[in-house]
Image (cartoon, grey):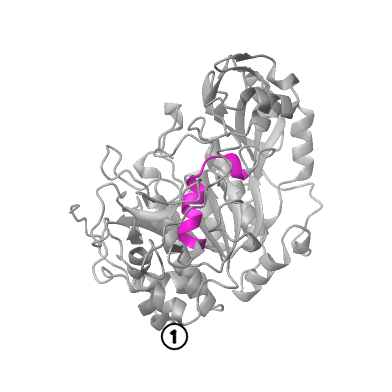
Amino acid sequence: MNLKKLLLLSASALALSMQAQVVGTDTIKNAEALDFDTYMRQLMGESKVRLDTLPPCFRFRVELKDKAGSPYSLSNPSAYLSEKALARRAKFGIKVDQYDLPVSPTYLAQLREAGVKIFNVSKWNNTATIETPDSAIVEQIKALPFVKNVTFTWSQPKVVSVPVLTEEDRTPKNKLEPYKDIYGGAQHQVEMLSIPQLHQLGYRGEGVTIALIDGGFQNADRVSTVKQENLLSTYNFVRPDSSVYVEGDHGLNALSCIVANEPYALIGTAPEVKFHLLVSEDGLSEQLVEEDNWAAAIEYADSVGADLVSSSLGYYHFDHKAMDHTYREQDGHTSFASRAASLAASRGLVVCISAGNEGDNSWKKIGFPSDAKDILTVGALKADSINTVFSSLGNTADGRIKPDVAAMGQDVRLIDADGTITEADGTSFSCPLMAGAVACLMQAYPTKKPLEIIDAVRRSGHNADFPDNVYGYGLPNMMKAYELLKQAPVATPAKKIIAKKRK
């Protein structure tokens, strides 16, 4: 994610997992030997620590030939999918298939026996991400009879500078200034989508489960605008031993666009949804492994039965140039993360992904996985409904309209880690605004298939008659989408691609 903030690592994760020498204002040696309390006392008050001379470490994506030697079967899906995940498939007539079967435990065991650590896995892509201090071992891994291919995805940065959270950082002030409007600071951004009318009908996301995949949710467990009773689970796919609440606040910013529920201060687009908070973004470097993390996270969202995914992350340029993506890869299945997003859609999940903020730089186009198929890619608008200069452009390499739709993405009101209302720019925030709006539609029409929901949202856009590579189908009117869903389903007609200049 190229406009990401540097994420905040927990001291425990640094001390316990990185096992490196730490250098701050005062030198702290042998961090791995310190107990957590002592470590925190030494760091308390420091604004950041610097990790030097980290030991070599590498990660590789191992693609497997098949799923042989597995105890799992298609006849017993409850062994690896939750009751809610199975109910979603049954509701939409989706059969459990080979993609749903877990990666073979036999193969994973043999990889471990070869001397590597399993960092994460993707059953949909049938891969395992391995970690090793010795890159030469890859030749041994390639020779294993069940291995199809091996791809380099990550190397340990030699020097990283890591901000440190103090107890003050973890104690939000929760000071909310009152506004005259019931939606508080969010009034205009929700009105642009006609959300208040949906809410007045009783559709506020109740009964819908959303998973947010992001870079950290600092203080989401302590800010007053996030209702803890609606939290279902958290998981950190970057540092599994570290809390999602100490990994930066970008995810919290996005979350608040959906779930904030403080009248006359800030109300999000779907304040009654249940949610999972998943971290896949590593703020210490930009490397291909983050797509593997993302795939693992969206598979988790599927397996626990989420209905909807919102992710404000995107990739195209990495620290290692050989990892970079190209325009021609934007076909919805070449990128690892894009393939996972497309497969999630085929499992009955509605997936909302930010288009990206590259419109005014040399790349200009959407990133990955926002090129995925059968999802909603969300661009950014100003308060006057004109596109922002930074919102990434479409279309995909195979000719599909992107972005699909757009919502307010400049001067968006949201909650920061201090628990106060602030403003921020980016498709990172137009995306969750849209995801919450979609959640309200899903509550209103729980039996409508994801593609029917997506179709109605597209057709309700102000630019639906002439979709292009700037606005896509435009700013949706969610009340119009609500009315369209009352009617018999009508497939979105094929549209000629029109490339508009940015305004």
Locate residue 320, reporting x and y percent: 45, 26
Q: Main secondary structure of the magenta part?
A: helix
Compared with 139, 458 (above or below) is below
Q: Quadrant of residue 145?
A: top right
Residue lying furthest right in this view? 71
Locate residue 421, reporting x and y percent: 42, 53
Residue 321 is left or right of residue 64, and the answer is left
Locate residue 363, reporting x and y percent: 30, 39
Q: Amino acid at mark 1?
A: Lys
Check residue 249 for magenta coloring. Answer: yes
Quadrant including the N terminus: top left
User: Which residue is denoted by mark 1 in the rendering?
Assistant: 486
Q: Residues within 10 Å of mark 1 (few under 14, many from 20)?
A: few
Label 1: which secondary element: helix
Locate residue 119, reporting x and y percent: 67, 36
Q: Quadrant of residue 473?
A: bottom left
| Nearer to me, 497 or 261 | 261
Magenta-colored span:
244-259
The answer to whether residue 219 shows anywhere in this view is yes
Which residue is found at the position 55% from the left and 25% from the top?
46
